[in-house]
Amino acid sequence: DTAVSQTPKYLVTQMGNDKSIKCEQNLGHDTMYWYKQDSKKFLKIMFSYNNKELIINETVPNRFSPKSPDKAHLNLHINSLELGDSAVYFCASSSSGGVGAFFGQGTRLTVV
Amino acid sequence: DAKTTQPTSMDCAEGRAANLPCNHSTISGNEYVYWYRQIHSQGPQYIIHGLKNNETNEMASLIITEDRKSSTLILPHATLRDTAVYYCIVRGNNAGNMLTFGGGTRLMVKP
């Protein structure tokens, strides 16, 4: 069983569209994250959700919005996509006092 | 901002031990040292973490200096599949403490 799963794995879309990336974890963790890895391969934190409350929100455009229907899911919604949004997006989860975060396999988003 | 400094790249011969250094001179008392790796096109993978004692698991060993200002990740018998970018991260252990990734060390294991 996959611990942290993301869908889709690949997403190609046109500028201006709205898209969502789904993330689910079956580890019983209480915190979930979204990271962005750009073409230079730097991994940057975007959001952190703990017990359905946003507790860290880095300076990302408000076109990006995380939505958590329950503790096991943290979906990423992106409005009005831009070329610069092209990147690999990773979802992760962790538990308080746990051994660190577990990551999904990433979603490669390409905006054309 | 990342709080760690790592060499950009390293080579290691297959079957030999790979020793990856990390400097974290500004680490605070409640921060742990974490190591992750990212194999090409995959998500980051947790390897090991420690506070001040040396740690060992099935993947690697972590040696932390007594002053906690630096550490070394040891892969005892590197294989070709260990070729990856290795990230050293310092992080508190409270809920919501995020992992801040730096540039990491690109380890190339060669036959």
Image (cartoon, rainbow, N blue to C red):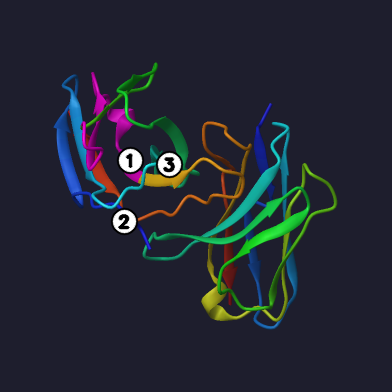
Nearest the camera: A62 or B68?
A: B68
* The label number, if any, that marks residue B84 in the structure image: 1
Residue at image x 65%, y 81%? A15
Q: Position of residue A67 (x, y in %)?
A: 78, 60
The chain under label 3 reads: B
Number of numbered discs visible in the structure rendering? 3
Q: Which residue is mark 3?
A: B30
Determine which of the numbered discs, if any, sits on residue B102 in the image. none
Residue A89 quadrant? bottom right
**Sequence-first tag of 1 and 3:** 3
Residues shaded magenta: B66-88
Q: Position of residue A51 (x, y in %)?
A: 76, 47
Closer to viewer: mark 1 or mark 2: 2
Residue type at tag 3: Asn
* Disc 3 crowd, CA 10 A, few/some/many (<14, 14-19, 20+): few
The picture quadrant where one finds residue B37 is top left
Which element carries disc 1, helix, strand or loop?
Answer: strand
> Is there a contact, CB below 8 Å, between mark 1 and mark 3?
no
Q: Nearer the viewer, residue A112 or A51?
A: A51
Do residues under tags 1 and 2 come within 8 Å of each other at their CB atoms?
Answer: no
Tags 1 and 2 both on a single chain:
yes
Residue placed most toward the observer, B108 or A34: A34
Q: Which residue is the site of mark 2? A: B103
Q: Position of residue A2 (x, y in %)?
A: 66, 31
Answer yes or no: are tags 3 and 2 on the same subunit: yes
Instruction: Classify mark 3: helix, strand or loop.
Output: loop
Residue beneath the point at 19% across and 48% down: B9
SS at circle 2: loop
Front label number (1 vs 3): 3
| Lower position in the chain sequence, tag 3 or tag 2 | 3
Label 1, label 3: how far apart the Cα atoms are? 28 Å
